[in-house]
Amino acid sequence: MNRSNPNERKTVSRRDLLKVLGTGATGALTISACGERIRPHMESQRADVIVVGAGFAGMTAARQLRQAGKDVFILEARERVGGRVKGGTLAGHPVDVGGMWVGPTQTKLLELLKEHGLHTTPQFEQGKAISEINGKVTYPEGEGSGLDPAAQREYERVVGELNRLSAQVPLDEPWNAPGAEQLDGLTVEQWFRINTRNADALEFLRLGTRSVFTTDPSQMSFLYFLFFLHSGDNFETLQGFQDAAQAYLVKETMHQLAVKLGNELSNNVVLEAPVRQISQDANEVTVKSDKGEWHASQVVVAVPLPLSVRIAYDPPLPPDRDILAQHMPMGSVIKCYAAYPRPFWRERGLNGATWNDSPPTAGFFDVTPSEGAPGILVAFIEAQHALQWTGKSVEERRKVIIDKIVSLFGPQGANPIDYEDQDWPSDPWSRGCYGASMGPGIMTTVAKVIREPHGRIHWAGSETSTKWMGYIEGAIRSGERVVEEVLAELQRAG
Amino acid sequence: MNRSNPNERKTVSRRDLLKVLGTGATGALTISACGERIRPHMESQRADVIVVGAGFAGMTAARQLRQAGKDVFILEARERVGGRVKGGTLAGHPVDVGGMWVGPTQTKLLELLKEHGLHTTPQFEQGKAISEINGKVTYPEGEGSGLDPAAQREYERVVGELNRLSAQVPLDEPWNAPGAEQLDGLTVEQWFRINTRNADALEFLRLGTRSVFTTDPSQMSFLYFLFFLHSGDNFETLQGFQDAAQAYLVKETMHQLAVKLGNELSNNVVLEAPVRQISQDANEVTVKSDKGEWHASQVVVAVPLPLSVRIAYDPPLPPDRDILAQHMPMGSVIKCYAAYPRPFWRERGLNGATWNDSPPTAGFFDVTPSEGAPGILVAFIEAQHALQWTGKSVEERRKVIIDKIVSLFGPQGANPIDYEDQDWPSDPWSRGCYGASMGPGIMTTVAKVIREPHGRIHWAGSETSTKWMGYIEGAIRSGERVVEEVLAELQRAG
């Protein structure tokens, strides 16, 4: 049972050979009279370590490996560095269409920003927010919930319970939390329903969960959720502005940090080099990308965990890791920006922040630059709502977002000077954002291998971090952790 | 920011070129003095249709396309055909280490078996089963549950309710079932807990669900579960032997059917040809495999749905399809066989069937050949239990299975004449078995695109079937459905 005519041979022209070898942007194919030379990026190259993916995890790892004197290359699938941190332009102003905020306990990221001469500026919150929960519209001050007193009391009680439970989850070994298996068998939605005795409080919990995780509470393990809360300090920190995860924006954009890191590493980064296969034997590891083949002693895979199994591995990955990836889908979010000549909502005493439980968006935020113009609102279409709007045209999303701005902030919203959005699930190298979340029954079983190397292959990426998992901070920390692992291996090998 | 030394070029020996071009089992590499000939399987070939995957879906599609006069190739990653149907040998007897049973309403599979001169034989069930639920051991007759009368009444009431609800789920459009979104937001476990008022009945429902789906009830959407029940007739049919999905074995093994189909298609199947990339433009589609490149008008991808996104697509898949694959992990099962000189359990009035809610296995079955020897027990380590035993050594699994046989059937179990098992999650081309199940919130959103072609790419595989989804029968039906789609496209294109 095999190919029909195994003995049939065809004359292959040089042009066909070119096709077989692939074509690329760099280097011309040169074949001598006897086929002795081929295009250089099809040649194999050598390094101490190959890093797959030039997001914050991969760039952190490469920087520190280089600092330790190692020869390192990052192979990046895209034509840019930064991963889920990405720049855009809105009404001529640079904006972050990917990761953007930084909080006071995200110390590694704050250091890195400082080191690169970038400045933080507080998230604006002076004035009244708009809260739309179960059809009730209220105007709480600052970051207030807008819930009525009974709902607020119940909400605070439940959040207290969440924080109490999450503090018991050991960050290094969440599977050893008290009652781990039972908590892991519940979805977040299931726990919320059983434990919340007020419909508005319940809805506000769901809304907050969708905002933080970009995943529906019915799709996540409750143990995973508790781990994540602990990893990012607690529920209020993940949710809030002041003193919390959304405390500061980067004046020059977060994207500028990615650009600066990329520039420092420019001799070590190969762009448009998606990695297709990683093979290893007793002597080395071979990484095949669309820009050729690299040989190294160790490899760091620093791509989103669910996408890491789309690379072919030889020998294959152990089943635990593959099952983990299968049960850890990316969250879904579309980040939408609208610009106005001025932040007109401020003139009505509004701070631009909204919490909405109805489609299309879970919330708006005012990210007007500190100069005060243009007025910029950012909205996140998250979780189940994103599934409705991903893959649609920008025009369709623009319409629904602008309509929502008009209904929330008034008729001045109808005439933005610009609109941009970033549809993360459509991005073939992220396939979602912010991060990946675990379904039930995974954290207490196969997730135990989340940081376990596969021979010469080491795993980085924010999803592997114990602190600030899913955040830029977590990505940086995962890069630092993996460097320790890799240096120990290099030393062991002599 | 790019490769460090784009201008560096190296002399490449013929041996290096060989390495670049890859080595394979068939065809020797021949390069003329001027590089004019290369190994034939690196050449590009042409067909009307390329089918990816030689499981029952892909082979059905290829057969029917060939019957319709189309030029078709199947590219199969493995060194064998059959997919999740696979043969093994136990004490010198052929056994199915993959799909094995066939039921009376699986009409397409029954026809195919008949057409190929293969024979069915009833699943043995004379005597008493062993039921171990919540620590209570009973010996029900035949397929009896062993539940006490109160638990049995509650179990039957709940199953009646499941059948009533599942009958309301339209097979073509399950997302239009009454209350679809609400049902899709629940896990099966959540619904079971809310609706079952007896601990033993609840445990038996969980056990049955793990057996049928090889997935934990906490990991599946309840709407998806109802759809699946309807797709396979009803809960009792999926669970039962007589007149049900486990009614018959194939005397010559199911694997023999795969072998016969493969032999018929031997001129059309390329083995060990994993497909890595599928690109398409206005004129054609190009399929890149480790055995070279094919050009065709249409492609059928007939691999397990969650694995289909591990192929690189250009242009990329729409986000809905990728999100669907991310939220549809494969189930986990290890199929274990033990052989004895005789079916000694029968002498004690036991029929070899067990239902166990404690690890490692959900159940044993007696699959002794009709000649009566050797005595063969098959066990399935399923769902969460499989996560514990996948990737371990055969010796470790053998020990735990044999210990269980001794504890259930007596000391004679201690001395099998042979033991074999198949660890499906470790298989890099299946990454689980039997099928893939949807998590919450997917069926009512992105699952709507499950059969939607991506340009020239069409989707087959049991997971895309509306009848007997996840079964061999569903695979065959998906192959037939996709042929209609592809022939219509070929006709449209003229």
Image (cartoon, coloured by chain):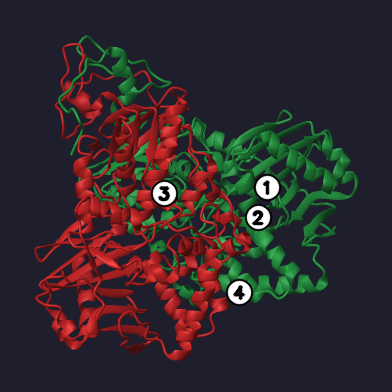
Chain colours: A red, B green
Q: Is residue B15 above or below residue B20?
A: above
Instruction: Kindly indicate whether the residues beneath marks 2 and 3 are on one polypeptide chain.
Output: no
Q: Is residue A198 left or right of residue A472?
A: right
Residue type, label 4? Arg
**What crowding class fits label 3: few (fewer than 14 Cα within 10 Å), some (14-19), or many (20 or more)?**
many
Among the two numbered marks 2 and 1 on one chain, the one whose residue lies closer to the N terminus: 2
- What chain does mark 1 sit on? B
Among the two numbered marks 4 and 2 on one chain, the one whose residue lies closer to the N terminus: 4
Number of callouts: 4
| Disc 1 secondary structure class | strand
Q: Is residue A322 above or below residue B416?
A: below
On residue A305, the disc is: 3
Label 3 to label 1: alpha-carbon separation: 29 Å
Frontmost of labels 4 and 2 is 2
Label 4 to label 2: alpha-carbon separation: 21 Å
Frontmost of labels 3 and 1 is 3
Q: Name the residue tied to disc 4.
A: B164
Frontmost of labels 2 and 3 is 3
Instruction: Kindly indicate whether the residues beneath marks 3 and 4 are on one polypeptide chain.
Output: no
**What crowding class fits label 4: few (fewer than 14 Cα within 10 Å), some (14-19), or many (20 or more)?**
some
Residue type, label 2? Ser
Residue type, label 3? Leu
